[in-house]
Image (cartoon, rainbow, N blue to C red):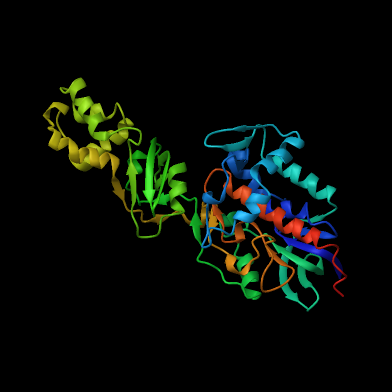
Amino acid sequence: MQDYDTIILGAGAAGLMCAAHTGGRTLLVDHAETPGEKIRISGGGRCNFTNLHAGPGNFLSANPHFAKSALARYTQWDFIDLVSRHGIAWHEKTLGQLFCDHSAKDIIAMLLAELRAAGAELRCGTEVGAISHDGTGFRVTLTPGGMVRARNLVVATGGKSIPKMGATGLGYDIARQFGHAITDTRPALVPLTFGDRFKALSGVALPARVNAGGASFDEAVLFTHRGLSGPAILQISSFWREGDAITLNLLPEADAFDTLRGLRAEAGARNISTMLATCLPGKLATYLCELHGWRGNMADLSDAALRPMADALQAWELRPTGSEGYRTAEVTLGGVDTDGLNARTMESKHQPGLYFVGEVVDVTGWLGGYNFQWAWSSGWAAGTAIAQAGEAPDPR
């Protein structure tokens, strides 16, 4: 049996960050053959590693105040400094989203370099079995490897999103084992489905404003053969609840009524579909005319007729049949209830030496690098708390 000061379960963003800061004898394990798989595929392979605007207001949680401490003590600027010190070139894309110029693999290599510098041990291709606490430390059964022991156990196993990459509910099971409550979990940052309603519009995209659950986002919307996707839809999916409607504003930067009156004045002799296609994608203009029965020329429409048309363009109510689920969800909303965790250290209030970091916790960021920032901040908070506690005594 091997003894460690700290065992970390999960070599994703939060686990790698934590392992680089714990000090002492640290073992990081993951069932995947290589570390940082979600980092590797993120941002189209370039990793949207943080956001310039990251702050507590960009996160969802049953306790919106919980994330404040970690985010304030390890900020986006701290991670940007780390990236720059490793010579990784990066750029801002839109809305404060930062990406690697070259590859997401640069972020993984950086974290592994930090891990090695800290003296931590990494074991991939390792399954986690039974976990217990004997009164002095944690016992964890690993395959291969047998039983290992440590005073500290950090759960960085993520949520249920993207199961094809091995995502499971292991972290929630461990939390329940040690007396923690789990808030309702559901897929987030995920496309919404509408059956085959928009099949003819598949591939059409446009800037729009999407509203649901008291939230509103102005970004691109993409029609797919399954329904709606694009940044605005992924964002609103975190606020949408099954059975509820969403509202699309297809002309978010204009007053639709004034726009329609302008089109009528400009070329009233032309048909409605043709003129709508000057401010909307052509396929969408045709679809809306068929959907609402808008026929004839613009000149045929009175102001009274333009009013409901304008409302339809700027308040199109749609009721999704569901979402694409964990299969394509970027993150899991909900998780380990923060009432049972210390906001400064991420340590369990029920079991000393037990920590939860990253996506497994009930803290979920917006699209755009926010979830990675939570991984860096929470991983750092737990890692430095463990290091500051000093070298752990032998659990025997």
The x and y percentages for residue 217 are 42, 44
**Nearer to the camera, 84 or 115:** 84
Which residue is at 35% across, 39% downward?
A: 201
Left or right position of 241 against 43: left
Locate residue 90: give its quadrant: top right
Which residue is at 52% across, 37% downward?
A: 95
Which residue is at 56% across, 61% downward?
A: 362
Asked if 202 appears above or below 241 in the picture, the reply is: above
Asked if 154 appears above or below 130 in the picture, the reply is: above
Q: Tell me, yes or no, if residue 33 can be seen here.
A: no
Left or right position of 301 against 69: left
Left or right position of 327 against 130: left
Which residue is at 67% across, 32% downward?
A: 102
Asked if 350 appears above or below 379 in the picture, the reply is: below
Asked if 188 appears above or below 83 in the picture, the reply is: below
The x and y percentages for residue 394 are 88, 70
The C terminus lies in which quarter of the figure?
A: bottom right
**Nearer to the camera, 144 or 268:** 268
The N terminus lies in which quarter of the figure?
A: bottom right
Locate residue 378: give its quadrant: bottom right
**Nearer to the camera, 223 or 367:** 367
